[in-house]
Amino acid sequence: MVDQFIEGNFLGLPDVDGDADVIIAPIPYELTTSYGQGTAEGPAACIAASGQVELFDHKLGQELPAGKKIRTVQPWSGEGNTLQEQLNGIGEYAAEQYNSGAFPIFLGGEHGILPGILRGCPKKVTLVQIDAHADLRDELDGEPYSHACAIARSLDEGAIAVHQVGIRAYCKQEADLIESDERIFTWFARDVMNPTTGGGRWLEWLESLKQIDGPVHLTIDIDGLDGSLVPATGTPVPGGLSFWHVDQTIDVLFENCDVISADVNEIVAQLDTPLTEFTAAMIATKIISAYIGKEV
């Protein structure tokens, strides 16, 4: 923890001059949630909780920012009269962060921010997705850009492929697509978390990450973790990943791939316990450390 927390800045770090190395970009977007509400407040809650995260990273051997400049930028404005106008606005906001030359970490907000982020991304990317849900529906309640369709629309809009892990809630249409679409590589929670055989499947997941060529965007729906760790998320699901599964995924990904950006989404503030937003803040901090570790 910093000695003096600067309110509104991730980890409470002081403002920085000049070009940043890492940007924290809040996107308080919530238009298509279908169960729990409150993701629009998630980015601010995550940033507030980050003030309690310890800055020392054992792999870096030092405290963040470890000689790097970390800047928290102003949130996306929320302008736009229609869903598509708002997604285009998110794309413009994301493009600003990419064009800065820093490594952007976007905080959501519902998972529906992802197609918007990719509209602003200057490169075609492979997605690495941690999630309880496949997010491959063609539509939900008549809306093709629902949060439940985030990966399907991202593939439609040019994502090269998706490698997804932790999946344990999906419909028949999504199951059929997973079987038939060669761009989709899925590791189900029931396999990687199996008490007797999960270890082998988990190692297969990690090995698959090492084979990814080209730019990668890491998208983490916080409900990919077990619901006991993230009770305040849009749609919490039991039987998910542990924090250390996510930690190891991030390590292997950054050590072996060209990760150009990340998002952590579906964060919901909860008044009686800050566990969800604190977990999200720790994951975002881990991403920062992994990025810096690759750069030094």
Image (cartoon, rainbow, N blue to C red):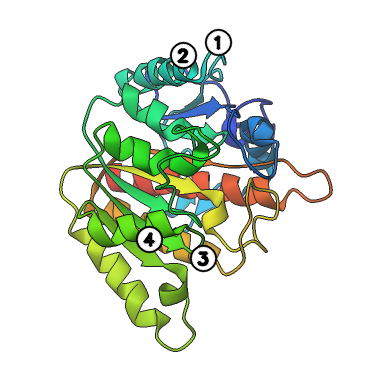
Report the mark closest to the observer, 1 or 3.
1
Report the mark closest to the observer, 2 or 4.
4
Dot 1: within a 10 Å radius of its alpha carbon, few (fewer than 14), some, or many (20 or more) residues?
Answer: few
Q: Residue 30's spot in the image, x, y percent? A: 60, 29
Q: Which residue is mark 4?
A: 175
Report the mark closest to the observer, 4 or 1.
4
Q: Amino acid at mark 2?
A: Glu
Left or right: 15, with 46 as reference point: left
Q: Which residue is mark 2?
A: 85
State how far apart marks 2 and 1 are (Cα): 6 Å
Disc number placed over residue 81 in the picture, else none: 1
Left or right: 57, with 276 as reference point: left
Q: Residue 50's spot in the image, x, y percent? A: 63, 41
Please, what secondary structure does the residue beneath circle 1 have? Answer: loop
Tell me: residue 214, above or below residue 134.
Answer: above
Q: Is residue 31 visible?
A: yes
Q: Is disc 2 in contact with disc 1, using a CB cutoff of under 8 Å?
A: yes
Q: Which residue is mark 3?
A: 241
Please, what secondary structure does the residue beneath circle 3 have? Answer: loop
Please, what secondary structure does the residue beneath circle 2 have? Answer: helix
Of mark 4 and mark 1, the one earlier in the sequence is 1
Q: Amino acid at mark 4?
A: Ala
Q: Toward which corner of the image does residue 269 lie, by quadrant?
A: top right
Left or right: 48, with 263 as reference point: right
Q: Quadrant of the N terminus?
A: top right
Q: Residue 129's spot in the image, x, y percent? A: 39, 51
Please, what secondary structure does the residue beneath circle 4 have? Answer: helix
